[in-house]
Image (cartoon, rainbow, N blue to C red):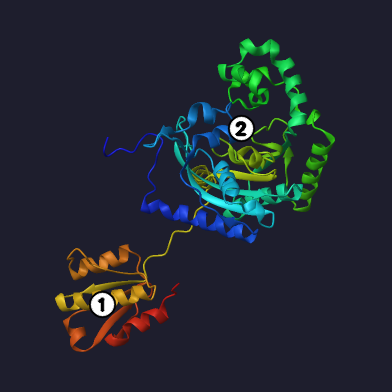
């Protein structure tokens, strides 16, 4: 057990971590181009936050949260999603008192107890954006555009954007009544989870992933037939803004989203490359969530996407992430005096933001050159007794094979001038 990671978790090894760094940097840069600022929230929150925001009837709250009592007897939950903690931070720090809208993004670990499968782990990571304070559907369109721009910049082209309106509480009350009437004669054919949702939140039944339930509800009434004039105008404007952005989309009246806090806009971005788990991004509007958490009435909209699932999608689409370059310099030494001088030089180079390494294993000269190749070094410095006596070093360009003699006292400046440093 000591040498085996818990089920549903995965190490990100040095040979793969560059892919994570690449997509994280890309996401941050694109969010910043849209005017979003990064926020970081704690790994755990009070359990009540997720019960009130995510919803008592959701699978997340009922089955999937990692919840425990801490030493002070407080009910604590590792965060299963990123939105609720950001809303809590927005309220607690009174960010609503600032000029609005507030546009935030995050990169965060999340935790859910569910069956591990391709692209889905129990300890996973999310990208997300949240916008507070703006009711205009132009913000909904912008949030969608952030996600689509990010995917496009990564090279993903075969994606489907699906949108829907799930109305407001007033719309959903009428819809829920019609849906209950339709489902009344089908309860004995639905799964236990759907039967439990029948009274508390029948719209969640539309989101059930079980084939037998989907077969029973295929002719269920659609929310778009029940939305009010105000919600319909909002949805029509969203479509207009997406058209202006030249973002192709499909209206899918069966998208309801899995969390209780959504209203009006709901959207998903679909990839068919990872089997049944096709949604690579999902989000929408949640105008009542800030108030539910204890803040003032404040509209909100955002999305979340799983990093593991994104990387799997890139892999399945044969999109290669550029591998990082090797180190700038490796110093090959012969003898104790040379080794001591190499330690001095390497420290000075690192202080100038040059990537440099030396041998720590007592390798032979030949083995040091091989190790330099393995590290994909741009240059190799060679120092031995002869070089020290003549106050010079040998500097080899590992790509061209060209070799120069450089004065020992000026080698640091010479390297700094030759390599691209931060």
> Which quadrant is home to the N terminus?
top left
Of tags 1 and 2, which is closer to the observer?
A: 2
Rendered view: 136 above or below 59: below
Q: Position of residue 67 (x, y in %)?
A: 44, 32
Q: State the image quarter where residue 359 is shown.
A: bottom left
Sequence order check, earlier mark of 1 and 2 = 2
The one of 347 and 323 positioned closer to us in this rendering: 347
- In the picture as drawn, the residue positioned furthest to the front comes out as 72
Q: Which mark is residue 344?
A: 1
- Helix, strand or loop at mark 2: loop
Residue at point 77%, 45% (across, down): 238
Q: Position of residue 402 (x, y in %)?
A: 35, 79
Rendered view: 406 above or below 35: below
Q: Position of residue 181 (x, y in %)?
A: 74, 15
Residue at point 69%, 45% (across, down): 298
Residues at marks 1 and 2 touching, judged by CB atoms closer than 8 Å: no
Residue 397 visible, this angle: no
Q: Is residue 94 left or right of residue 360?
A: right
Mark 1 crowdedness (10 Å alpha carbons): few <14, some 14-19, many ≥20 = few
Residue indicated by mark 2: 258
Q: Position of residue 357 (x, y in %)?
A: 29, 68
- Helix, strand or loop at mark 1: helix
Rendered view: 313 above or below 186: below
Mark 2 crowdedness (10 Å alpha carbons): few <14, some 14-19, many ≥20 = many
Residue 350 visible, this angle: yes
> Which quadrant is home to the C terminus?
bottom left
Q: Marks 1 and 2, Cα distance to the nearest angstrom?
A: 58 Å
């Amino acid at each position: 057990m000591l040498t085996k990671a818990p089920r549903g978790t995965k190490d990100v090894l040095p040979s793969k971590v560059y892919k994570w760094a690449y997509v994280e940097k890309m996401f941050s840069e694109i969010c910043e181009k849209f005017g979003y600022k990064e926020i970081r929230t704690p790994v755990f929150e009070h359990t009540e936050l997720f019960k009130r925001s995510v919803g008592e009837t959701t699978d997340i709250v009922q089955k999937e949260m990692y919840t425990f009592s801490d030493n002070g007897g407080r009910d604590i939950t590792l965060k299963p999603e990123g939105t609720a903690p950001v809303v809590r931070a927005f309220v607690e720090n009174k960010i609503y008192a600032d000029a609005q809208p507030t546009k935030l993004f995050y990169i965060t670990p999340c935790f859910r107890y569910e069956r591990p499968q391709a692209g889905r782990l129990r300890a996973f990571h999310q990208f997300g954006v949240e916008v507070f304070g703006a009711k205009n559907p132009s913000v909904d369109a912008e949030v969608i555009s952030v996600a689509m721009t990010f995917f496009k910049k990564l090279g993903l082209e075969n994606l489907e954007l699906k949108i829907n309106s799930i109305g407001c509480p007033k719309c959903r009350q009428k819809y829920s009544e019609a849906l209950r009437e339709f489902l009344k004669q089908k309860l004995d054919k639905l799964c236990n989870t759907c039967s439990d949702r029948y009274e508390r939140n029948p719209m969640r039944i539309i989101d059930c992933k079980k084939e037998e339930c989907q077969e029973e509800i295929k002719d269920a009434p659609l929310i778009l037939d029940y939305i009010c004039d105000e919600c319909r105008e909002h949805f029509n404007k969203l479509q207009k803004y997406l058209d202006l952005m030249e973002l192709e989309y499909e209206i899918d009246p069966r998208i309801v989203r899995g969390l209780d806090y959504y209203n009006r806009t709901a959207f998903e971005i679909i990839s068919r490359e990872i089997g049944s788990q096709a949604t690579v991004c999902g989000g929408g509007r949640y105008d009542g969530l800030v108030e539910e958490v204890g803040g003032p009435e404040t509209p909100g909209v955002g999305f979340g996407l799983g990093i593991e699932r994104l990387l799997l999608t890139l892999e399945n689409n044969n999109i290669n992430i550029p591998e990082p370059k090797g180190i700038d310099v490796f110093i090959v030494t012969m003898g104790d005096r040379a080794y001591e001088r190499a330690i001095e030089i390497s420290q000075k180079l690192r202080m100038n933001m040059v990537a440099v390494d030396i041998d720590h294993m007592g390798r032979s000269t030949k083995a040091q050159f091989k190790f330099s190749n393995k590290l994909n070094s741009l240059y190799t410095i060679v120092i031995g007794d002869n070089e020290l006596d003549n106050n010079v070093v040998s500097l080899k360009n590992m790509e061209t094979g060209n070799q120069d003699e450089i004065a020992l006292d000026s080698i640091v400046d010479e390297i700094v001038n030759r390599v691209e440093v931060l």
